[in-house]
Image (tube, rainbow, N blue to C red):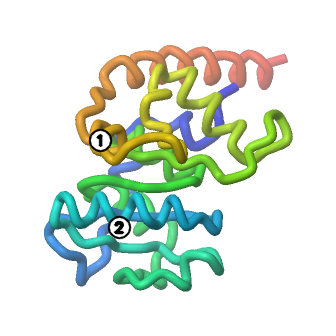
Amino acid sequence: MLDPTLLRTPEQWKEISRIPEGLPDKYILIYRFADSGHTKSVIDRISEELSIPVVSLPLSTVAMKDDYQAFYDAGPREFIGLIEHAYLVCTDSFHATVFSILMSTPVCVFLRENFQGGDSMNTRVISLLEMLELKDCIISEQDSLQKALQCLHVDYTRAHEILADRRKASLDFLKHALEE
C-alpha cells in the first residue's frame, strides 16, 4: 500500500493548494527537522550559487533558529502551494519529498544524521526514492554542491508512471478489501 498522500493524483492535490502572499517570485523552500550544520551549509551554498532566496516553513525548533524568510501561518493547503511553486525544495521530511515529487518540483533530500538503518526516520524516504527510481535526489555529507544542483534537472516522468501503477494497485486492493 502506498502512503495515503500518494493515493491522490497531482491534479487532485493542485486543486486544493494555495500559495501564501509575500513570497519572492523565485525561491528555495526548506522544510527540515534535523539539526544539521551540513544541511544548512549546503542550502546556503545553493542559494548563493543560484542567487535565489530561501524561504522556510519553520515547523521544528531547529528550523526556527534559521535566518531565512519564514512562513508560520501555513496549513496543509499552503504547504502544498509552497512546494508546488518553489524553484527547489530542500528537505529531510518524507511528506515534503512526497509533495515535491507529486508537484514535479526539484527536490534535494537530506538524510537525517546518524542514520543507523531500519530504525531511522530516513527509512521511509529512502524506500520511496528507491521505488520511484529517484535515489539521486539524496544528498549525503560526502556529496558535492554540484550533486545538489543536479537535483534541479530531475525528470519525474518515470516516477509518475510508477506512482500511477502503484496508486491503481493500492486503490484496487482497498476496494477489494472493503467489498469482502
Would you call the spot at circle 2 few (<14 residues within 10 Å), some (14-19), or many (20 or more)? some
Give me the residue at 48% from left, 81% from top.
66
Give me the residue at 48% from left, 84% from top.
72
Q: Earlier in the sequence, mark 1 or mark 2?
A: 2
Residue 153, percent from left and from top? 24, 34
Give me the residue at 39% from left, 17% from top.
161
Residue 149, percent from left and from top? 28, 44
Query: Closer to the camera, 163 or 55?
Result: 55
Image position of 170 with respect to 111: above or below: above
The disc at residue 146 is: 1
The residue beneath circle 2 is 44
Query: Closer to the camera, 160 or 59?
Result: 59
Q: Give amino acid for label 1.
A: Gln
Q: Give amino acid for label 2.
A: Asp
Image position of 37 with respect to 149: above or below: below
Give me the residue at 53% from left, 49% from top.
110
